[in-house]
Image: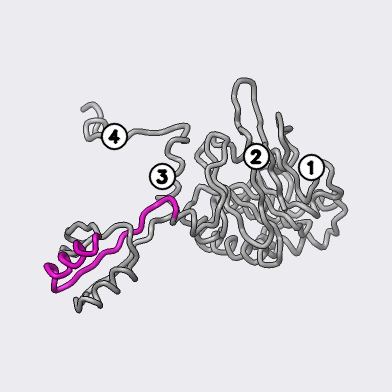
Amino acid sequence: MINVVDLSKEYGQVRAIDGLSFDVQPGIVTGFLGPNGAGKSTTMRCMLGLDTPTSGSATIDGQPYRQLKNPLTKVGALLDAKATHPNRAAKDHLKWIAQANGISTKRVDEVLELVGLSAVAKKKTGGFSLGMGQRLGLATALLGNPEYLILDEPVNGLDPEGIHWVRTLLQNLAAQGRTVLISSHLLSEMAQTAEHLIVIGRGKLVADMPMAEFIRSHSATTVRVRTLEPAELAVTLKRAGITFSQELDDLNRPSFVIPDVSSDEVGKLAFENHIALLELAEHRASLEEAFLQTTGDAVQYQATTMNNTQLEGDK
């Protein structure tokens, strides 16, 4: 596992991480979330020995990263995909890393093919697009066939096909029993990729739980119902002590909006009272809604909503 225990990091008067503790389990993809300035990158840098904690510890398989023998074969990391020499070819970039870590250069061709860069292996990295740079960064992380992966924004700059490929790759690696930790600001993608979430805000732990539980615990579920017997349904809901509102849906049809209940409960109630339903739809809150509710007080930079005068400016 990756173990973070009472981790703190100060830069002068700024406390970037404040007593942070969590574990990253093998066999699942763990998402690492937090607003800008929450301390995600600093935490990852402490895990990888790039920053020294002010107090506490971050260990991988029970050891600090700096004490790992042949660390690239143990941990694959992507923190900055631009960390390449612009005049060095992609294949040469991977070769010198492989040779420095005792990895066969045959592995270079394997990872280039895996990430889809074989055709541009001899192209200088300075001419790479953002997406190509991300793929090369992932190739570097996978070079040592590591047990652990620590990836900061791995899908940044990738097209939809590339994002789907990364998602599938990470889930397959986790299914092999590896430990996978990823951060991302693409919450819709994180919702499809990660099974477990670690959420931090202002350097402190906000949540450490399965994805489904996080969404369920920090946001509401709403049921939308349409029926040809609205009066009967209204009476039935009131009798059951269920609150509701009535409004028009997107197609201008009258419907009931019922918060904090499941569609199973509403459907069972309607069936028992012989009320025919035309529509019974459950809206589950998204990861984005749950994340915003949970971390709203921890946002470092928060914009305000502009009014029409501000949007139009001086004329």
Residue 201 appears in the picture as rendered: yes
Q: Tell me where residue 307 sits by quadrant.
A: top left
Mark 4 and mark 1: span between their CA atoms? Answer: 47 Å
Residue highlighted by disc 4: 306
Give the mark nearest the N terminus, 4 or 2.
2
Q: Where does residue 115 sit, x and y in percent of width and height?
A: 66, 61
Image quadrant containing the C terminus: top left
Q: State the residue at coordinates (34%, 33%).
A: 304
Question: In the current view of this chain or complex, which residue is farthest to the top?
Answer: 13
Residue highlighted by disc 3: 293
Mark 1 and mark 3: span between their CA atoms? Answer: 34 Å
Element type at mark 1: loop
Mark 3 and mark 4: span between their CA atoms? Answer: 21 Å
Q: Is residue 274 above or below residue 90?
A: below
Dot 4 alpha-carbon crowd within 10 angstroms: few under 14, some 14 to 19, many 20 or more: few
Stretch of the chain drawn in magenta: 217-241
Task: Give, as a three-letter code, the residue at label 1.
Answer: Pro
Give the mark nearest the N terminus, 3 or 2.
2
Give the mark nearest the N terminus, 1 or 3.
1
Residue 131 appears in the picture as rendered: no
Task: Give, as a three-letter code, the residue at label 3.
Answer: Gln
Query: Within the magenta stretch, is there residue 223?
Result: yes
Q: Where does residue 287 sit, x and y in percent of width and height?
A: 45, 54
Q: Is residue 276 above or below residue 72?
A: below
Element type at mark 4: loop
Residue highlighted by disc 1: 64
Q: Are marks 3 and 2 in contact (CB under 8 Å)?
A: no
Residue highlighted by disc 2: 43
In this rendered view, identify the residue nearer to me: 142 or 150: 150
